[in-house]
Image: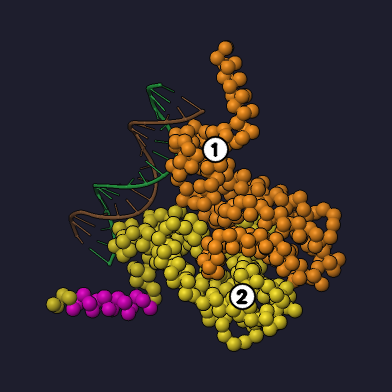
Chain colours: A yellow, B orange, C green, D brown
DNA sequence: GTCTATATATGGATAGAC
DNA sequence: GTCTATCCATATATAGAC
């Protein structure tokens, strides 16, 4: 019993001490896995890469997360959660459509600036993982996200004459395209336009205003 | 000598007969490889998948293309060539900016409709393949593609007051984003909006006009 | 919990018969 | 040119010592 108590105490201490600084092994693994998966995807990632990145060895990965697929599942769910739910907090509330759209664009581009590889990771895994386990779990969760609120919001704004007539899915596509595509196509575009890293970063930041204005000029009556 | 002659004759016959119908083994392999690589990327594709898809066996793949990397290189170059050079034929010529933009959007969306997985393949491989051989070969070729003509075209249109002031790279990003993103994000968007395959296809076709009008409303003085 | 060593599976590539 | 059989490197996963 003494041993058990000590074990629990130690674990509790580790949690308190480590979780603050994200230095727990589990957290180190998750951070490392995120970096590797984001850049190489499920198929391209190697457990060895993740272990190296975390400064541990492969065996420990399997100790914490039983398999590569398991670890990937966790990372994907986190990523998808980071990318999508922001939607709900903005639309379906009171306020002028223009304000909500500006807020949405700002939140979305900020999210991508903080996680530049996230959009490509999520969209990439949804292509290749059509049959994989990925789809099952999150398809269910996704159906109940409040995307209908956005569609309804757009529909209402059109009906009130607040914006020019447009199909809600088309506008949603346009907005997300303008926000996320620059991050997805960065390797191509930076090369095409012969821009340095700082130059492209600057361009990305400028898009918060650029995109919002571009859209609003187009849909304002 | 008789045997050599016969061999050449046979080869010539095969070329004439098969190339017409794309039934040559080499062509079957390329078509199969394209389908598999487009969906799974270099890392996710399996030589066995390609062999199955082509109706042959793995050994024959290596007979025609020495390695997986080789085969991938060919497919990537073709894909990149399909995606990019269209640019040159439109910009840098005479005509109203509005006409050129409509033409560009039309060509680009038509290309993607004909090759729905191509955009994601090219952009995906450019992310993961940052260090790979992929970049070397095409980086050189790309520098000399006439993207400066587009930038110049936009710059001139702004200066003439034909369109509202905008940074050329920003407009280029907006245009390509609106054209290509719907294909890249299809798995996500179709689910979000609970659309059937035919419904989403219809939406994609509608974007030829949708996108052009959306852009022009925004940049017209 | 963390390590080293090893088992097992997968997949790219080759050898050799036809 | 095309096949079957096989080699060999790589990568996931486990066993067992500390």
Residue most toward the bottom? A94
Callout 2 environment at 10 Å: few (<14), some (14 to 19), or many (20+)? Answer: many
Residue lying furthest top: B1
Residue A105: mark in rendering: 2
**In the image: residue A15, left or right of residue B33:** left
Please tell me which residue is depicted at 81% across the width and 68% down the height of the picture: B163
The reply, left or right, for residue A16 in relation to residue B172 is left
Please name the residue that numbered disc 1 is placed on: B28
Is label 1 or label 2 in front? 1
| Host chain of mark 2 | A
User: SS for tag 1?
Assistant: helix
Q: Nearer the viewer, residue A12 or A133?
A: A133
- Residue B179 is left or right of residue B70, and the answer is right
In the rendered structure, which segment of residues is drawn in magenta?
A5-20
> Badge 1: few (under 14), some or many (20 or more) residues near its Cα, within 10 Å?
some
Q: Quadrant of the N terminus of chain B?
A: top right
- Distance from label 1 to label 2 (Cα)? 45 Å
Furthest residue toward left? A1
Is B186 on the left-hand or right-hand side of B143? Answer: left
The x and y percentages for residue A180 are: 59, 67
What label does residue A189 carry, if any?
none
Q: Position of residue A22 (x, y in %)?
A: 39, 73
User: Chain under label 1?
Assistant: B
The front one of B218 and B157 is: B218
User: Can I make out residue A14 in this image?
Assistant: yes
Residue A107, image quadrant: bottom right
Figure disc tally: 2
**For the point 68% across and 54% down, which residue is it?**
B110
């Amino acid at each position: 019993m003494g041993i058990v108590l000590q074990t629990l105490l130690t674990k509790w201490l580790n949690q308190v001490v480590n979780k603050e600084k994200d230095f727990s092994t589990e957290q180190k693994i998750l951070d490392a896995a995120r970096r590797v998966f984001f850049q190489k995807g499920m198929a391209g990632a190697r457990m060895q890469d993740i272990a190296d990145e975390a400064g541990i060895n492969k065996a420990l990965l399997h100790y914490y997360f039983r398999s590569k697929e398991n670890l990937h599942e966790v990372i994907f769910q986190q990523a998808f959660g980071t990318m999508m739910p922001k939607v709900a907090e903005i639309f379906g509330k009171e306020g002028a459509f223009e304000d909500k759209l500006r807020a949405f664009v700002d939140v979305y581009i900020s999210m991508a600036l903080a996680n530049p590889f996230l959009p490509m990771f999520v969209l990439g895994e949804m292509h290749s993982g059509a049959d994989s386990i990925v789809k099952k779990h999150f398809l269910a969760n996704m159906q109940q996200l409040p995307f209908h609120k956005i569609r309804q919001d757009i529909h209402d704004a059109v009906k009130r004459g607040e914006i020019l007539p447009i199909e809600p899915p088309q506008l949603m596509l346009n907005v997300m395209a303008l926000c996320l595509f620059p991050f997805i196509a960065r390797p191509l575009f930076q090369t095409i336009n012969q821009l340095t890293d700082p130059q492209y970063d600057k361009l990305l930041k400028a898009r918060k205003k650029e995109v919002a204005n571009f859209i609003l000029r187009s849909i304002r009556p």
